[in-house]
Every structure is written in structure tokens, then in C-alpha cells.
């Protein structure tokens, strides 16, 4: 049996951008920059959700509505 941490999914905010950008940099060979995420968060049709594990952002998903 495995013990998995509780995961909370919530709408991400601008205060989450630094953590999201760090995950992005580890996962992609051509990651978005901090500037690109700030621009994204200002787009009214964009939405981003953050996954938190023990209070730390451990994942995210961003899309357009």
C-alpha cells in the first residue's frame, strides 16, 4: 500500500507564478518564461489551476476558455 499526500486543486493566482515557472523549467526543453506567465495571467480567456501537496505547488494546468 502506498501513502500519497492529499492534493488540493485550486485556481492559481499571480502569486503562484514563480513556483509554476520552476516546474515548467524542469519539465520542458523550451519552457515559458516568468514574463510569459505574467502575460498569460492577464489574459481574460486564460485560466490556470495549481495542485498543492502539503502546501507546496506540485503541478499545474493552464488553458484558455
Image: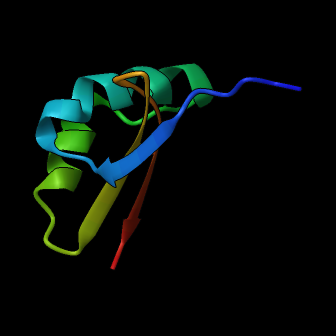
Q: Is residue 4 left or right of residue 38?
A: right
Residue 5 or 63: which is nearer the viewer?
5
Vertical order, 61 against 56 (above or below): below
Report whether residue 29 is seen.
no
Residue at position x 56%, y 19% from top? 26
Residue 32 figure quarter: top left
Vertical order, 47 against 44 (above or below): above
Residue 36, image x, y percentages: 26, 41
Vertical order, 63 against 13 (above or below): below
Residue at position x 59%, y 31% from top? 28
Residue 45 or 60: which is nearer the viewer?
60
Display colour scheme: rainbow
Residue 63, image x, y percentages: 40, 65
* Image quarter of the C terminus: bottom left
Residue 48 or 10: which is nearer the viewer?
10
Residue 50, image x, y percentages: 37, 44
Residue 46 figure quarter: bottom left
Q: How many marks?
A: 0
* Image quarter of the N terminus: top right
Q: Is residue 63 left or right of residue 40?
A: right
Residue 36 or 8: which is nearer the viewer?
8
Vertical order, 48 against 30 (above or below): below
Q: Residue furthest bottom?
A: 65
Report whether residue 34 is seen.
yes
Residue at position x 15%, y 65% from top? 43
Amino acid at each position: 500500500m502506498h501513502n500519497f499526500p492529499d492534493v488540493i486543486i485550486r485556481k492559481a493566482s499571480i502569486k503562484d507564478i514563480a513556483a509554476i515557472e520552476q516546474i515548467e523549467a524542469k519539465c520542458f526543453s523550451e519552457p515559458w518564461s516568468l514574463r510569459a506567465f505574467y502575460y498569460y495571467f492577464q489574459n481574460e480567456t486564460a485560466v490556470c489551476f495549481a495542485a498543492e501537496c502539503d502546501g507546496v505547488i506540485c503541478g499545474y494546468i493552464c488553458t484558455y476558455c
